[in-house]
Amino acid sequence: MKNILVLCTGNSCRSQIAEAYLRFFAGDSAEIFSAGVETHGVNPRAITTLAEDGLDINHHTSNHVDEYVGIPFDYIITVCDHAQERCPLFPSSAQRFHFNFPDPAKAQGTEEEIMQQFAAVREQIKQYCKEFVQTHLQ
């Protein structure tokens, strides 16, 4: 079984969404963790946008990367540039991947417009996670 860590700035939106989809697509072939270089709490809109696609992350917590130093990760995926810049501080021989997804927490406008941005980022992350699992875990 492979160990995968998804890193973001605050472990609030993008890394939470990626964790959920990686778990969904990987099934029993990987243990998935997510963390931030800071902790901001799980964004309620991230919970809502995943629920719209049938995934429940109500039980997720926002975790700091330091909590996982002792885990031998096979893959580390950074999902924002800020975490990518600070990722080298995390000691690991894991293979590293990076994709800078837009931050839906910074979306502005009406609630409907903000949720549309969350849904758009969700779909980008979903596709990335599906392809990652197909390429690296199957």
Image: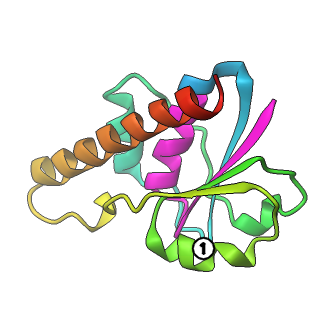
Q: Which residue is rendered at x = 39% and y = 49% of the image? A: 44
Three-letter amino acid code of the residue under disc 1: Glu
**Residue 52 is inside the magenta segment:** no
User: Looking at the picture, how far across and down is residue 132, in whole percent?
Assistant: 53, 37
Farthest residue, direction front: 135
Give the percent coordinates (x, y) of residue 107. 21, 63
> Residue at position x 86%, y 52% from top?
71
Q: 73 above or below 35?
A: above
Quarter of the image with the C terminus is top right
133 or 122: which is nearer to us? 133
Q: Please, is residue 50 above or below residue 29 in the view?
A: below
Residue 89: where, in percent of width, then height? 73, 78
The answer to whether residue 57 is visible is: no
Residue holding disc 1: 38
- SS state under label 1: loop
Residue extent of the magenta highlight: 1-24
